[in-house]
Structure formats: structure tokens, C-alpha cells
Image: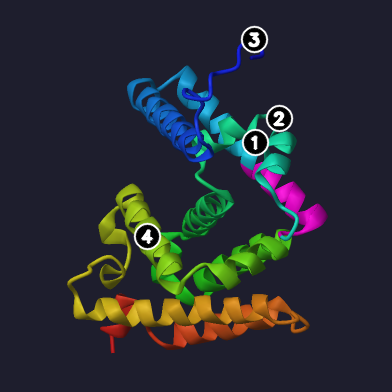
């Protein structure tokens, strides 16, 4: 028997090794989460830096080779980490993409100026959609993949979560009430139109994209504004 080799009776099967690997990674992930909760300094900055590096690697690789050839090994190599470190932060490439989609939604919501939304909703909607267009065109293959693989409920859930978080930041009273109140019957109206906006962009992303994205934004802007989805407009007439 070679030095360091386990006897057959003690050797682990492939399944057992897989279980042990999964348990190790799960334990490491819990340890990492615990450190994040206990420390607000060095560890948090390291975690943020690592996740930013992974997402930058995703952005670069998708632009260079598309989604089809994307692998965890390639992401880890580009981010200058090992595969184990990747799995400490994300369960899979799909989990990374979900997180990236959530980041995009939060970034777009942050462009909303409550005062402008109240005074000139058409201008605010157009500015926000211009930001959407900029984000999509910078990573069109990645967002096309999202459009094909993320459910409408997933996207709307992230939009609603981001809106509620933003409302806490700027003040709930400064945003249309029905955007945030799940129990309000009027809540279903903006959800309906937001779903339409997401659907239109998804259709464009899944098509040959020969139509200018600015035309898509124009259609969405007109629909959102003319629909009176703002509580202030809807109840003012």
C-alpha cells in the first residue's frame, strides 16, 4: 500500500467524499457569514472586495466569450481566487447572476428622485429608463441570459424589495403609497405596469435586437406615465 493511502476498508466512496466536501463548504460559508455579522471592519471589506472581483470577472468574461463558455474555474481564475473561495460566496453561477440582477435593480431604483417623480413623473421615468438602457447595453449578453432564465416573479420581487428599502432611505411619505403597501388594492396597478415594462425589455433582449433600445424605452415610458400608476396622479383626477 502506498504511503498515505487509506486501506480499502477506510477509503471513502465518491458519494461520501462529495458529502464531506459539501459539509465543509457549508461550514465555511456559515463561518464567513458569522464573521460578517460580528465584524464591521476588515472582514466586511474583504468580503465586499472579493464579491466585486467575482462580478467584475463575470462582466469581463461574458463580454469576451459569452455565457455558453462561462465556468466557475474561469471566473475564479479571472478574479484571482480559487474555486473554494467562489463557493464560499455563491452556490453557483446562477446564484451569482441572481445577485447581479439584484444589484442592477437596486442601482436603477437609486436613480429615482422623489421630488422630480412628484413634480414631473414623465421626466423621472425617462431618466430612469435611460439608465436602464445604459446598463443593458453595457452587458447585453448577460441581460439577455437573465431575460431567458429569470422568472417574472423573481424580477418583480427584487424591484419591490428595492423600492421598500429605498423608501426607508428617502422617507416612505415621499414615494407613491401604493408602490409600497401590499395590502392596498391600488398596489396591483403599479405591479401590473411594472410587469409590462419588464416584459417589454425581456422581449427585446430575447429578440434579434434590431429595433433601437431607445424605441423600447419610449414605449415603456409612455405606458407608465399615461397609465397614471402614481397614486398622486391616479387620485388627482
Q: Nearer the viewer, mark 4 or mark 1?
A: 1
Mark 2 is surrounded, within 10 Å at the Cα level, by few (under 14), some (14 to 19) or many (20 or more) other residues, namely: some
**Counting residues from the N terminus, which is met first, the one under dot 1 or under dot 3?**
3
Where residue 113 sits: x, y (%)? 45, 59
User: Magenta residues?
Assistant: 55-67
User: Which numbered mark, 2 or 3, is in the foreground of this view?
Assistant: 3
Image location of residue 15, percent across then percent down:
48, 40
Image location (x, y in percent) of residue 126: 57, 73
Q: Separation of disc 1 and disc 3 at Cα? A: 40 Å
Per the picture, the main secondary structure of the magenta-coloured stretch is helix
Q: Which residue is mark 4?
A: 163
* Residue under label 2: 80
In the rendered view, does 173 fall on the left or right side of 3? left
Q: Is residue 111 left or right of residue 228?
A: right
**Which residue is tagged 1?**
53
- According to the image, what is the colour scheme of the structure? rainbow
Q: Quadrant of residue 35?
A: top left
Dot 1: element: helix
Q: Quadrant of the N terminus?
A: top right
> Within 10 Å of the Cα at label 4, are there few (<14), some (14-19), or many (20+) other Cα atoms?
many
Toward the viewer: 79 or 86? 86
Residue at image coords 45%, 31%: 20
Residue 117 or 5: which is nearer the viewer?
5
Q: Nearer the viewer, mark 3 or mark 4?
A: 3
**Separation (CA) of disc 2 from disc 4:** 34 Å
What's the distance in space between the residues labelled 2 and 3, CA to CA?
Answer: 33 Å
* Element assignment for label 4: helix
Amino acid at each position: 500500500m502506498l504511503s498515505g493511502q487509506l486501506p480499502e476498508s477506510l477509503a471513502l466512496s465518491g458519494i461520501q467524499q462529495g458529502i464531506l466536501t459539501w459539509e465543509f463548504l457549508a461550514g465555511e460559508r456559515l463561518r464567513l457569514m458569522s464573521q460578517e455579522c460580528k465584524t464591521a471592519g476588515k472582514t466586511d471589506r474583504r468580503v465586499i472586495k472579493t464579491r466585486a472581483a467575482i462580478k467584475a470577472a463575470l462582466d469581463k468574461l461574458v463580454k469576451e466569450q459569452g455565457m455558453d463558455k462561462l465556468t466557475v474555474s474561469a471566473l475564479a481564475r479571472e478574479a484571482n481566487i480559487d474555486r473554494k473561495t467562489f463557493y464560499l460566496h455563491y452556490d453557483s453561477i446562477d446564484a451569482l447572476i441572481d445577485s447581479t440582477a439584484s444589484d442592477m435593480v437596486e442601482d436603477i431604483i437609486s436613480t429615482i428622485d422623489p421630488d422630480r417623480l412628484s413634480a414631473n413623473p414623465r421626466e423621472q421615468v425617462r431618466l430612469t429608463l435611460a439608465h436602464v438602457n445604459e446598463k443593458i447595453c453595457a452587458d447585453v449578453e448577460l441581460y439577455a441570459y437573465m431575460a431567458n432564465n429569470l422568472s417574472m416573479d423573481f424580477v418583480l420581487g427584487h424591484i419591490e424589495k428595492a423600492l421598500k428599502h429605498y423608501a426607508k432611505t428617502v422617507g416612505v411619505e415621499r414615494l407613491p403609497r401604493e408602490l409600497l403597501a401590499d395590502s392596498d388594492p391600488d398596489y396591483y396597478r403599479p405591479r401590473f405596469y411594472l410587469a409590462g415594462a419588464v416584459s417589454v425589455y425581456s422581449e427585446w433582449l430575447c429578440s434579434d435586437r434590431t429595433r433601437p433600445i431607445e424605441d423600447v424605452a419610449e414605449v415603456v415610458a409612455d405606458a407608465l406615465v399615461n397609465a397614471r400608476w402614481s397614486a398622486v396622479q391616479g387620485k388627482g383626477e
